[in-house]
DNA sequence: GAGGATTTGTGCTTTTTTGCACAAATGTGT
DNA sequence: ACACATTTGTGCAAAAAAGCACAAATCCTC
């Protein structure tokens, strides 16, 4: 950018980043974290693209939306780029997560150690089952285990207020999901990860991401079916 | 289709269905199943769209790719449409699933009852942990529980051959995922659902779908961060 | 059996996403 | 200091997806 005037527009996060790009940033971030762990200093778009399963052109365009953090002829500095992505995505702060529904899945999520290392802290568990309420559940993997009390659904609002949770996970049966979602929203949660196989309707301004494992298998089955021979 | 010649191309599944459409069919299918359970006979595109969180125009276009199964001025017959989608997606047959990695997540998946009702049968569990191999794990929810033996990783190929599994689930730590994937492919599996947070490279003709829970939280966090006020 | 009310199916437009190709920028070696 | 090899950043083209709007088909009523 020689002739163009000085003021760099790119800097502030005023710039709109496309949804497709946002959905790929976590993969770049993870790959960069691994590279950093392995002490690698630099990486080219070609290599990082191969590592994350995208084309190098797409990777470069994605990254260019965050700013111009590479060096032509050289590549990207692993640690620096990782930091820029984490900053852009808000991963340099901790996020508190409340899990509603402590069944098979909710428990697996709570036990999982991989969230903590990425800045997500499960701070509260909520369930409707009387036999579960009041019991303790181990959260996080070895090293950083915390025991969390399972709270009653009726305490949801208080728990959210106390823990300052900003992300909600719905891991209840499908029948209860909409009700739970409504209560989460009413309690101030505006970002929900939904595992129940139903569409949640939420007011404008609330984001829902749905993870539907059965659908994934069905999509695989669809393609598998077409692999005749 | 007035002037255009008669021969209806639509009928056989020769027609190419877009990936975006395929990814939405499971949601339509699920909604239709619920409606069928509730004895509802007919439904309009508008209603079904609301139920699944898409626009009615998109729903109609999606469905039109399967064939012309609605009636103008009336809507769609729930049971008939459900059957057409299930046929198109290969859900009128059973699919055998092998799960590799019987930890938090693998176990939750095995326990889950919702797969069986959709035609997916977990037929084999495989792990590398000596203390797990040989133990039994309950599969499926109440009513249709089956106890499955956890097999050694070294038996993977045999297990797949014996059980005729066609779908593979990778629920191992990230470090092992690529190795496991390679072995699944070598054993003839061509459809893989991957929960490990790494990109799996597989030969042409093999499909991988990745479910990355941490990424989902990160994407939520990204948007949450921008909800400044 | 004609007219009006619905609701599908689809041609066309707009937006989003992906892919290509190359100039611009950097490093290297002589 | 200059030619050359690399690799980024991006303008432009292509493809895919989403949205709009309306004619065509069906049902219902009188
Ligand atoms: N487990 C899996 O592998 C899997 C796979 C695909 C989808 N899912 C979906 O994820 C969700 C959870 O699955 P799961 O296997 O953990 O089910 P689960 O039955 O083991 O657990 C559900 C939990 O939610 C609690 N609950 C019920 N109603 C509630 C309410 N109103 N408020 C709070 N808690 C409530 C129950 O007490 C129970 O503890 C389901 O919607 C299921 O369809 C699970
Ligand atoms: N549990 C979660 O909620 C969660 C969330 C996000 C991502 N994940 C990812 O899902 C995967 C599984 O998570 P988890 O919590 O169940 O982990 P886990 O450690 O509880 O279970 C992993 C299992 O895989 C087995 N294993 C290890 N190497 C193996 C190999 N080579 N072959 C076969 N089995 C092997 C281990 O013995 C263990 O039983 C991980 O990649 C994790 O990052 C899990």
Image: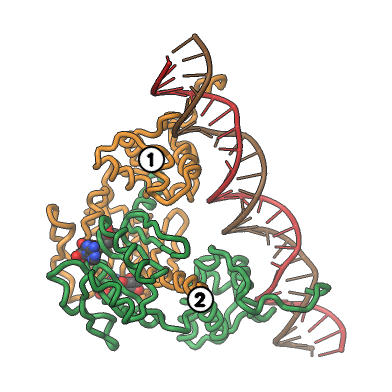
Chain colours: A orange, B green, C red, D brown
Q: Nearer the viewer, residue A158 or A7?
A: A7
- The chain holding disc 2 is A
Mark 2 crowdedness (10 Å alpha carbons): few <14, some 14-19, many ≥20: few
Residue at the location (46% across, 70% down)? A219
Q: Quadrant of the N terminus of chain B?
A: bottom right
Question: Helix, strand or loop at disc 2?
Answer: loop
Question: Helix, strand or loop at disc 1?
Answer: helix
Mark 1 crowdedness (10 Å alpha carbons): few <14, some 14-19, many ≥20: some
Residue D19: percent from the left, percent from the top?
Answer: 62, 58
Q: Mark 2 — residue?
A: A229
Q: Is residue A83 above or below residue D27?
A: above
Residue at the location (40% across, 30% down)? A74
Within 8 Å of ligand 2, the CB of disc 1?
no
Residue at the location (37% across, 44% down)? A89
Left or right of residue B21: residue A138: left
Residue A194: percent from the left, percent from the top?
Answer: 37, 64
CA–CA distance in space, label 2 to label 1: 47 Å
Query: Quarter of the image holding residue A145?
Result: bottom left
Q: Mark 1 — residue?
A: A88
Q: Quadrant of the C terminus of chain B?
A: top left
Q: Nearer the viewer, residue B61 or B57?
A: B61
Name which of mark 2 and mark 1 comes first in the sequence: 1
Query: Quarter of the image holding residue B96?
Result: bottom left
Residue B71 visible in the picture: yes
- The chain holding disc 1 is A
Q: Nearer the viewer, residue A97 or A156?
A: A97
Q: Nearer the viewer, residue A125 or A7?
A: A7
Ligand 1 location (quadrant): bottom left
Residue B98: percent from the left, percent from the top?
Answer: 32, 74
């Amino acid at each position: 950018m020689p002739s163009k005037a000085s003021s760099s527009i790119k800097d502030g996060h005023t710039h709109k980043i496309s949804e497709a790009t946002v959905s790929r940033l976590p993969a770049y971030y993870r790959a960069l974290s691994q590279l950093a762990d392995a002490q690698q200093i630099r990486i080219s778009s070609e290599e990082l693209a191969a590592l994350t399963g995208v084309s190098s052109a797409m990777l470069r365009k994605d990254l260019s939306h965050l700013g111009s953090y590479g060096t032509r002829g050289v590549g990207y500095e692993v640690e620096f780029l990782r930091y820029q992505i984490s900053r852009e995505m808000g991963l340099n702060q901790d996020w508190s997560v409340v899990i509603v529904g402590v069944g098979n899945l909710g428990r697996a999520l709570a036990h999982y150690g991989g969230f903590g290392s990425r800045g997500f802290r499960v701070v509260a568990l909520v369930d409707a089952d009387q036999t579960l309420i009041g019991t303790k559940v181990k959260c996080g993997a070895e090293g950083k285990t915390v025991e969390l009390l399972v709270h009653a659904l009726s305490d949801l609002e208080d728990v959210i207020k106390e823990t300052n949770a900003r992300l909600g996970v719905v891991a209840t049966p499908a029948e209860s999901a909409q009700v739970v979602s409504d209560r989460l929203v009413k309690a101030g949660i505006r970002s929900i990860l939904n595992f129940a196989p139903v569409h949640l309707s939420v007011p404008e301004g609330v984001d829902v991401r749905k993870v539907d494992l059965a659908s994934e298998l069905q999509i695989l089955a669809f393609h598998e079916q077409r692999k005749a021979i």
